[in-house]
Image (cartoon, grey):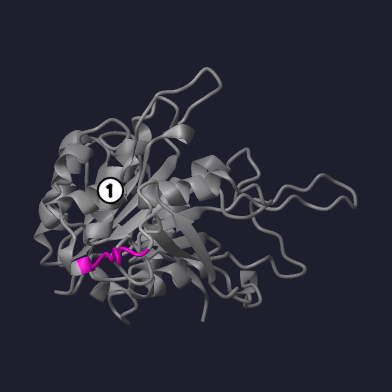
Amino acid sequence: MAAATVAMGQTTPVPAGAARPPAVMPAPEQLQLETSDGVGLTAWLYRAPEEQPGHTSGGTAKSGGNAPSRPPVRTTVILLHDLGGSHESVEPLAVGLQRGGCHVIAPDLRGHGQSTKRLDAPGRGDTLEAKLLKRGDLEAMAASAGGSVRDQATARGDVETIRDHLRGGGEAGGPSLDRLVVAGVGAGATLATLWTAADASWPPLATGPQGRQVRALVLISPAWTPRGLPILPALGQDGVKRDLPILVVAGRGDRDATRIFDQLKKNRPQEWFEQRVGQKPASAPKLDRPADATTVFLQIDSEDSSEKLLGGRNTDPTEMVRGFLGVVLAGERRGSDRP
């Protein structure tokens, strides 16, 4: 059977002759990090597989002759789980994106999984529990503020700590900030939006930009107000309100996701596309092609929500996400060495 790719919910056959040998999936690598408020953050890196011998990535640039090609600059995805979850609960999506050629970093957010200790509180027994987290704890997860120089910021929460780790990279072809996507599930989608807004708020320095490093945002069953933390202010901030490609995926009964997409539509009245269960695809009146939309809503025919949508035979959104990223990042590939 021919392989397939998905773009904006549509399936397009790929010639069977174009198929590549199965790539060997690298085992997840465990990262040990620390936030600015002393939380020990454990994250897992799902490294993209290397190219198979005899094959080159569509974005790999060759210098001619017998000179070796440069490693491709791959998409790096920061993937955030829902409240009560962990990196394991979003692993089906992490592995699916890894198989698609992305580097994925999935942390256990504070109070979850193996991220339950404050490293600056020896002997105090300061343990964080997911069920006891309040609004302030969620705000700390998405914190990126303090001062005018980002690399010296006094408030670096869970996501910002991962960003700092990526900034300190430099491994050719490895995870980096060059093509950064942030994705989240449930409350993790809300946190992804809040952090993306915070990323966009950093003012440029004389040496260059400090923010706006996110190239696309993926929200799977996003929550409107988890633990009293609203997503609405972030939806109206520059860097999220317009231009940034945003995908919303949810089950047919997910009211929060529908509400969030409707708000995005108000901000982008000529740049939206949606495919709801049992309805014909709809788009902005002046939108020529679905691929030109900057905000997309894809419904899954399921009453499930959040992490229950991941990994199911009929509910797995992985191909939707991969197809969306393939479309919205395609412009960055043209005229560059990026896959």
Q: Which residue is mark 1?
A: 140
Instruction: Identify the residue at the far top of this view.
Output: 206
Confirm whether residue 269 shows in the render: no
**Hey, which quadrant is residue 281 in on the image?**
bottom left
> Looking at numbered disc 1 in the image, what kind of residue is underneath it?
Ala
Magenta: predominant secondary structure element? loop
| Location of residue 270 with respect to 112 vertically, above or below | above
Magenta residues, start to end: 123-130
For the residue pair 71 and 189, the one nearer the viewer reads as 189
Q: Position of residue 215 (x, y in %)?
A: 43, 43
Q: Position of residue 238 (x, y in %)?
A: 28, 30
| Location of residue 193 with respect to 105 vertically, above or below | above
Q: Position of residue 265 (x, y in %)?
A: 18, 41
Confirm whether residue 246 shows in the render: yes
**Hey, which quadrant is residue 200 in on the image?**
top left
Q: Name the residue located 30 percent from the left edge and 38 percent from the top edge.
A: 197
Secondary structure, mark 1, is helix
Question: On the picture, is 27 further left or further right than 77?
Answer: right
Tell whether position 181 is magenta. Answer: no
> Mark 1 packing: few (<14 Cα in 10 Å), some, or many (20+)?
many
